[in-house]
Image (tube, rainbow, N blue to C red):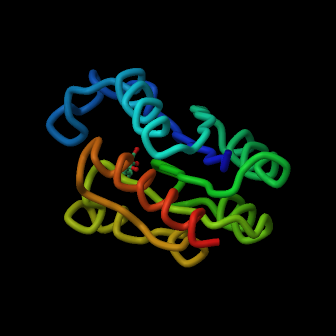
Amino acid sequence: MKKVLIIHGPNLNLLGQREPDVYGNINLAEINKKLTVLAVSLGVEIKIVQTNHEGEIVDAIQKAISWGDCIIINPAAYTHTSVAIRDAIASVNIPTIEVHLSNIYKREEFRQKSFIAPVTVGQISGFGENSYYLALEAASKIINAQ
Ligand code: DQA
């Protein structure tokens, strides 16, 4: 079975209580549960990681060399700052999809720049929790086309 690594970056562990007007009321456990159900129907295996630490995101991306046919990542605030995460994605040569719950282009100017987007297949931004499910469907199509 093809494998998809899903990485949730900093502060996403607080979904549900964190700025619900921006990020919605659903919590991360509920999103992960729905991703798990969707993965079964798509016939892909998923592994889900959440960390608040930049280096741990880099480690997770590197580990995907031996476990992962596709990466879905919401780098959260590191989207706008992290050369290290960008370089990790560029280094592993695994198709990667960038996800954001909010539409980062509708928000503050500092959020409108993604360091990550140029090394991804594409970005899904602004569909709330559905951004993740759309990303998993896209990942399954990318993998099956390989
Ligand atoms: C986010 C958008 C980022 O700007 C922000 O720092 C986040 C969440 C999103 O999913 O909309 O933490 O990645």
Above or below residue 27? Residue 102 is: below
Could you tell me which residue is drawn at 63 percent across and 57 percent down?
70
Q: Quadrant of residue 22?
A: top left
Above or below residue 113? Residue 143 is: above
Q: Residue furthest right?
A: 66
Could you tell me which residue is drawn at 57 percent across and 64 percent down?
144
Decide which of 116, 68 is in the foreground and name it.
68
Quarter of the C terminus within the rendering: bottom right
Above or below residue 144? Residue 100 is: above
Q: Position of residue 112 (x, y in %)?
A: 34, 69
Decide which of 108, 17 is in the foreground and name it.
17
Decide which of 69, 117 is in the foreground and name it.
69
Judge from the rendering whether residue 103 lies leftward or rightward of residue 10; answer left or right: left
Q: Position of residue 68 (x, y in %)?
A: 72, 50
Could you tell me which residue is drawn at 34 percent across and 28 percent down?
15
Q: Position of residue 31 (x, y in %)?
A: 37, 30
Judge from the rendering whether residue 18 lies leftward or rightward of residue 69; answer left or right: left
Judge from the rendering whether residue 92 lies leftward or rightward of residue 134; answer left or right: right
Q: Quadrant of residue 34?
A: top left
Q: Position of residue 80 (x, y in %)?
A: 48, 61
Q: Residue furthest left?
A: 21
Above or below residue 1? Residue 20 is: above
Q: Quadrant of residue 55?
A: top right
Quarter of the N terminus within the rendering: top right
